[in-house]
Amino acid sequence: MKKILICYGTRPEYIKIEPIILHDLSQFHDIKTLFTGQHKDIVQASVKPTYSLEMNACAPNRLNSIVANITGSYAFDQILSDGFTHVLVQGDTASAFACALAAFNKGIKVIHLEAGLRTGDKSHPFPEEAYRQCISRITDIHLCATYYNFRSLLKESITEAEMHVVGNTVLDHLKDVSISYNNDILITLHRRENHKFIPFWYSQIEDLAEQNPSLNFVFVAHPNPNSRCVFKRGLTNTSIIDPMSHKSFIDRISKCRFLISDSGGVQEEASFLKKRVIICRETTERPEALESFHYLCKKIGDLPKIFNNIVNDYKPEGECPFGDGKAAEKILQVL
């Protein structure tokens, strides 16, 4: 029996580790959870964490503060010393990197959920690409969502026996969601590299709204104030709605026509729910769904052309490349 500490600090991390927690691995392993505290106000955990850390919200550099807060925490060091054999981290956040590093420094094996995502450019996305590459170097069990991720790790000389393709756990939430298509274009923009460009994306989207009065352009605000903006033209078919729960957001995705987004998780969820995404980024670490489902929009000026190409061709064909909604079951078999 393994003693596993599952660590998370942000809402996306919790959403993706929740299926593992709820799958009752406790009948096979001693499972505990640790909340590192970044998204203290918006993580809606259905299972209360075993341990929690306090985050310094006033630090001058938030990323450095998160890493230092975790790796330098006496409380966390004491938790790790309580017989844990493995630490599981998800994705590529500062908390995932710091928890993996702290475990490695204690000689504890690291399990990396959603391993092998790559763009090859450490600036896109920043800082996630660098964090996930660093995590891979100290991981013992790599849980990949796709064979593309598997092959990316092989190219980096990761031992094949340490890698397992299990699908993406976020899809485990979506197995019973029904799908329809209304006239909503759902929009989310929040990535650091997009912050200074968000007003320009808004302006371009307002142009599209003027040209397509029968469609509703619905911007879902992100909790980060740096990603906030306003529609300036007072169009009746543009709106901004407050941040919402993951369940409510999935309901919106399941009913919309398609999405405009820079989110990584949205690419996975939308693929499973048969919705296209115009990806507002220079690159994506999820190329498996390009063309058959999604389209990469590297420049703001390219948005109208891509939009017009799919506005009436919005129902993608093919199977979701990110899994079948049974990732937690497969992870149980691996562990």
Image: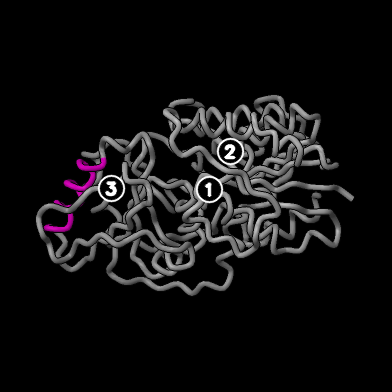
Amino acid tagged 1: Thr
Amino acid tagged 2: Ser
Q: Could you tell me if the residues under marks 2 and 1 are in contact, i.e. CB atoms within 8 Å?
A: yes
Q: Could you tell me if the residues under marks 3 and 2 are in contact, i.e. CB atoms within 8 Å?
A: no
Q: Could you tell me if the residues under marks 1 and 3 are in contact, i.e. CB atoms within 8 Å?
A: no
* Number of marks in the rendered image: 3
For the point 51% across and 34% down, the residue is 128
Q: Is residue 124 left or right of residue 307?
A: right
Q: Nearer the viewer, residue 328 or 22?
A: 22
Which badge, 1 or 3, comes first in the chain's sequence?
Answer: 1
Q: What range of the chain is rendered magenta?
A: 198-210
For the point 57% across and 43% down, the residue is 54
Q: Nearer the viewer, residue 50 or 182?
A: 50
Answer few, some or many: residues within 10 Å of disc 3's Cα (few below 14, many 20 plus, some between 14 and 19): some
Q: How far is disc 1 from disc 3 in space, using C-alphas?
A: 19 Å
Whether residue 123 appears in this view of the structure is yes
Say which residue label 3 marks.
228
Q: Nearer the viewer, residue 67 or 320?
A: 67
Say which residue label 1 marks.
10
